[in-house]
Amino acid sequence: MNEILERIKEAYHLETDAEVADFLDIKPSTLSMQKNRGRLDLERIIERCSDLNKNWLLDGEGRKRTVDGAYTQTPIPIYTSLDIKDLKPDFKNSPKAGDIYTDISNGLGGLSERDNLIGYVNSGNEMAPIIKENDIAVINLDEEPVHDEIFLIASSHEASLRRLQKEQNKLIAESQNGKGTPIDIDVDEPHRCIGKLLWVIRRVQ
């Protein structure tokens, strides 16, 4: 039974049993009681996880998500900042604002999996007017660095949004609105592309 809960956490970027209970729309105490009895409410779990392959969800076999199953209400986790360790984001220790629930379809943007998406709250004005302070940047973690696209880049202790440019067969991360020095992500100092900007979510003023 615990394996099923761990798969739910993995599929929907959840960290605690309390978050799982919230996702399943039950009380944490109810979930705890079900775990102690070794009897989860599988009917509710299958209903709430309708976009997951039931064989994977229940037994860990096959693809994580169904090819033609329901794709409604898929959560994208939103982080207010990212804790960077060894040039990789540590999602477990990064402050999370919550989730945005969306009905992203299988064909939109050529995405076949949605568990590779995160939201990152832009704390600065690095890419104005494209990305402003407090905008939520939706990042695809699986994209490789390419010319003339905006990427979330990790340094030794922080992450920032930068546009990549190819110069002399090297990818250079542009400076922030003309301030500071461009970053040679291959040479100057340790930097790594975390993922590519797909969309920007902006609060209506």
Image (cartoon, rainbow, N blue to C red):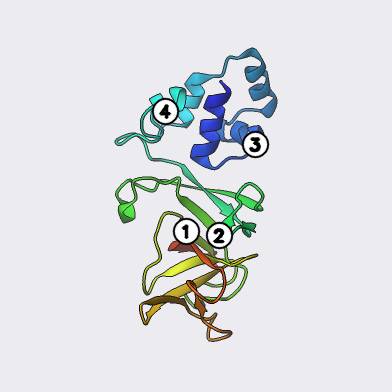
Mark 1 neighbour class, 10 Å CA radius: few under 14, some 14 to 19, many 20 or more: many
Q: Residue furthest bottom?
A: 178
User: Residue 197 location, x and y as percent?
Assistant: 44, 64
Residue 94 higher or lower than 74, as above or below: below
Above or below for 147 versus 11: below
| Residue positioned most to the front | 187
* Number of numbered labels in the structure image: 4
| Residue displayed at 32% across by 56% down | 109
Spatial CA span between label 2 and label 4: 29 Å
Marks 3 and 4 close (CB-CB < 8 Å): no
- C-alpha gap between disc 3 and disc 2: 20 Å
Q: Position of residue 73 (x, y in %)?
A: 45, 41
Rendering coords of residue 28 (x, y %): 67, 28
Q: Where, by quadrant of the figure, is residue 56 drawn?
A: top left
Residue named by callout 4: 56
Name the disc covering residue 139, or none.
Answer: 1
Q: Position of residue 106 (x, y in %)?
A: 32, 46
Residue 120, label in figure: 2
Q: Residue at x 55, y 84 (%)?
A: 181
Q: Secondary structure at mark 3?
A: loop
